Amino acid sequence: MTSYGSLCDDFYSNVTLQTEMDLPTGRDAVLHFFEQLQRRFPKLSHFYQRERGEFILEEEKLDGCYRWVAAELRRVSSGYVNPGSIQEALEQHCEVLELAPYMLSVSRLDCEALSLMYGFDFTYRGNHNQLLCDALGLPVAFESISQRPGSQVMCYEPVIQISLDDTFGTHARINFEPRNGSLQTKSPEFAEELLSVYVTIRRFDSLTPEETFVGELNRLEKLMAELMETHVIESILKPLQSCIAIR
């Protein structure tokens, strides 16, 4: 399998469990949840709360490779930036999903959605929107207007979302985040900014009695691996990487 980190400047794997009901916010429940995670991953040592009430436990970011876990009012998230392997990230995500039902009282019925997201950041000094046009192409209906003499593409943020089964219970979404807007496009000089590609597979609704959070994550990861190998790498990531390299 292709190393995802070799296709971009930064790669990260995130999992989010969205709940229908509020999660416990008391000291005992929150601290016990994070303490159990710290036992499994001792470098998770920086604990803090953001203004909006989100609790975060993360590793130091000194080498650009770090883990983090967050607990919000109706969401538990796990992330790994620049993991050594997909398996390392998956082990962390599974640990979070194994602990959440016991430490945070999350039941199968309480699941609104479970998501696996792969993020790819590209550092690029230039017009991000034009780069996306050159790497991915434009729909035929828009090609002529983009080729108008003297024109520059100021906004091009394609998004596609598809159902992966006939029940519409599992979706795949690919979207892009260019970070220089219309005002910066007017300038002859561009700052070096991150252009991001997000690939998300999300399962909706409550789990059945036969399903588990970890089992569903493993299913999503298999779907993600198939999507990456058959579509995303060759059609999106490598063209972007090549276009950046020749500029």
Image (tube, grey):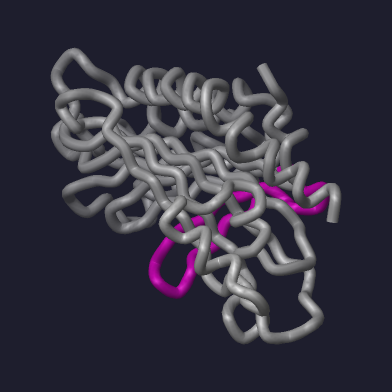
Residue 241 is at least partly visible in this image: yes
Residue 32 is at least partly visible in this image: no
Question: Does residue 67 sit above or below 85 in this rendering?
Answer: below
Question: Does residue 246 sit above or below 226 in this rendering?
Answer: below
Image location of residue 161, percent across then percent down: 34, 43
In the image, taking residue 17 as reference, residue 149 lies left or right, namely right
> Going 81% across and 52% down the picture, which residue do you hit?
62
Image location of residue 90, percent across then percent down: 53, 26
In the image, taking residue 197 as reference, residue 16 lies left or right, namely left
So how many labels did they put on this image? 0
When asked about the image quadrant of residue 182, the answer is bottom right
Question: Does residue 230 sit above or below 242 in this rendering?
Answer: above
Q: Quadrant of the N terminus?
A: top right
Q: Nearer the viewer, residue 187 or 77?
A: 187
Question: Does residue 185 sit above or below 35 in this rendering?
Answer: below
When asked about the image quadrant of residue 17, the answer is top left
Q: Nearer the viewer, residue 45 or 129?
A: 129
Q: Nearer the viewer, residue 49 or 10?
A: 10
Magenta span dominant secondary structure: loop
> Going 60% across and 21% down the picture, which residue do you hit?
87
> Going 61% across and 68% down the picture, which residue do you hit?
179
> Going 17% across and 36% down the picture, which residue do you hit?
205
Residue 59 lies in the magenta-colored region? yes
In the rendered structure, which segment of residues is drawn in magenta?
Answer: 45-65
Image location of residue 44, percent across then percent down: 64, 43
In the image, taking residue 91 as reference, residue 28 lies left or right, namely left
Q: Nearer the viewer, residue 76 or 150?
A: 150
Residue 111 lies in the magenta-colored region? no
In the image, taking residue 183 as reference, residue 55 lies left or right, namely left
